[in-house]
Image (cartoon, rainbow, N blue to C red):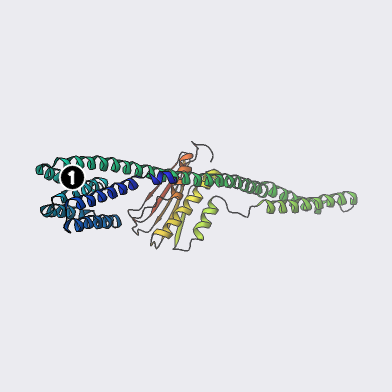
Amino acid sequence: MNDNETFISPEIYGTIYRLIGVILLCLLWIRTDSTIVGFFFTLFIVNMMLLRWRFNQLHWTLIIDVLVCISVSVIWPYGLYGLVLIVFNTLFINIGLLVLPIAIYVFVQGDYPLMVMLIQSLFVGFLLEKWKAQKNKDLAQIDFNSQKRRELESLKDELLTANIQVARMAEVSERSRISREIHDNAGHEIIAAYMSLQVIESLIDNDSKEIKEMFKESIKRLEMGIEKIRYTVHDLTPLTEVGIECLNKLCSEFTFCPIEFKVFGDSSKVPIYLWNILEPCLKEALTNIMKHSMAKKVNVTLDITPYIVRLCVENNGIKNNKDLSGIGLRNLRHRVGAVGGNISTDTSDGFRLICVLPIEPKGGFL
């Protein structure tokens, strides 16, 4: 909001209108009253307006202003013109119920100039109150849009990080798979062949020196090949935990309270990109438990079926009614929804987070 919009705000116009009203009331006192009653009455009206401007909870004091105006009018009849300012204030601060008895009283008095000024104040106060309401609505919308923009930027950053993590996890998973394949299949077969050749070596005729030398050379080269395979398997084996190992590590490093981690099903059926969602879900759940509960124990369950994977994190029943709808959880809902899954939380009986993801993706990769 720029300086011009601040200058023409309804609050500024309301202050100007009140100031003009006070000046006119002073002029009316100077021209019609030679006593000090009008002076103190005007001073009282000004002080009450300043008091309500400083303390918003004192709006009810407008009733006192009305009673004082009516009382002063017995001594100084023009004191009723103070009702013009009171009517404006009641509409401007949205207390319109007080206008009706004032209007009825003025109508009974039959003072038509006062009626005209009262109607004018009603009109101006009504317009400024609507303007102020629209301004507050616009400001609320601006704040809402700014919050949504920040959330989208946060989600964008998380998705970019998630894409990098998916690529890294895919590479680590492939390295791990190749390492297992070499170790479990090719490695065992080559070692078995090496052992067979060692047995055959003892059966070769000692007089066949040339054949024996060639055989020893073959075994030597085979030994070198086995050693290279061993080094290759060692280099391919990832140092970073992936999949179920990563979740298990998060649980083992959680020191807030004891945690029990159970897995049901074949974890090898879960695609890499789903592990990249399950990991932040578990982190978010453990963080909320640590921040917002007094849990003595946490249960983490991972159920894997041919069609879905379900992660459930819950504490041991410590109740917590705090609102947990933070940016982190909202971003997780976007990511989970992108693959056709859903995530829910419950704080009615402790804290519980349940994340369900389909094995067959509906929304594609993150």
Assign the N terminus to one quadrant of the image. top left
Q: Which of 206 and 146 is in front in this view?
A: 146
Q: Mark 1 points at which residue?
A: 99
Question: Taking 274 as reference, is 342 left or right?
Answer: left
Q: Residue at coordinates 24% horizontally, 56% vertically from top-left?
A: 48
- The answer to whether residue 156 is above or below residue 207 is above
Question: Taking 133 as reference, is 343 left or right?
Answer: right
Q: Position of residue 180 (x, y in %)?
A: 64, 49
Question: Is residue 343 shown to the viewer in this render?
Answer: no
Q: Position of residue 240 (x, y in %)?
A: 60, 54
Amino acid under disc 1: Val
Q: Residues within 10 Å of mark 1 (few under 14, many from 20)?
A: some
Question: Is residue 183 shown to the viewer in this render?
Answer: yes
- The answer to whether residue 309 is above or below residue 350 is above
Label tally = 1
Q: Nearer the viewer, residue 364 or 42?
A: 42
Q: Position of residue 108 (x, y in %)?
A: 9, 43
Q: Residue at coordinates 39% horizontally, 49% vertically from top-left?
A: 345
Q: Position of residue 220 (x, y in %)?
A: 81, 53
In what element is the residue under mark 1? helix
Question: Taking 45 as reference, is 161 left or right?
Answer: right
